[in-house]
């Protein structure tokens, strides 16, 4: 079985790992899978910070970040 994508949802209970931190770690240890979030709620972080995080992960992962 080949894993083609890795998607992280913001959890409702602990442990509360930051979505973009987990995606950064996944980008560092993988080479082929696409990375993205199911939900990135604007209630938890400012939209500009979310956009900057997404751009950073896209850069770290060589364009594998998926936003829909």
Image (tube, helix red, strand yellow):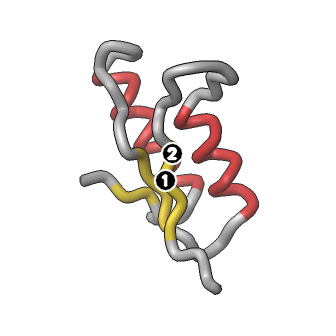
Q: Are the residues flagged by discs 1 and 2 in contact, CB closer than 8 Å?
A: yes
> What residue is drawn where x is 43% and y is 57%?
65
> What residue is drawn where x is 70% and y is 47%?
25
User: On the picture, is 25 further left or further right than 52?
Assistant: right
Q: How many numbered circles does the render carry? A: 2
Instruction: Give the structural element (helix, strand or loop) at label 1.
Output: strand
Few, some or many residues within 10 Å of mark 1 (<14, 14–19, 20+)? some
Q: In this rendered view, identify the residue nearer to me: 59 or 43.
A: 43
Which numbered circle lies on residue 8? 2
> What residue is drawn where x is 56% and y is 60%?
61
**Residue that lies at the very extreme toward the bottom in this rendered image:** 1
Q: Residue beneath label 1, please?
A: 7
Q: Quadrant of the N terminus?
A: bottom right
Q: CA distance from mark 1 to mark 2?
A: 4 Å
Instruction: Give the structural element (helix, strand or loop) at label 2.
Output: strand
Q: In this rendered view, identify the residue nearer to me: 29 or 3.
A: 3
Q: Measured from the top left, where is residue 26 in percent x and y?
A: 66, 54
> What residue is drawn where x is 58% and y is 28%?
18
Q: Measured from the top left, where is residue 30 in percent x and y?
A: 69, 67
């Amino acid at each position: 079985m080949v894993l083609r994508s890795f998607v992280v949802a913001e959890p409702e209970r602990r442990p509360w790992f930051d979505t973009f931190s987990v995606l950064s770690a996944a980008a560092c240890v993988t080479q082929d899978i696409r990375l993205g979030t199911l939900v990135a709620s604007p209630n938890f972080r400012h939209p500009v910070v979310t956009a900057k995080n997404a751009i950073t992960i896209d850069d770290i992962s060589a364009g594998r970040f998926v936003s829909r």
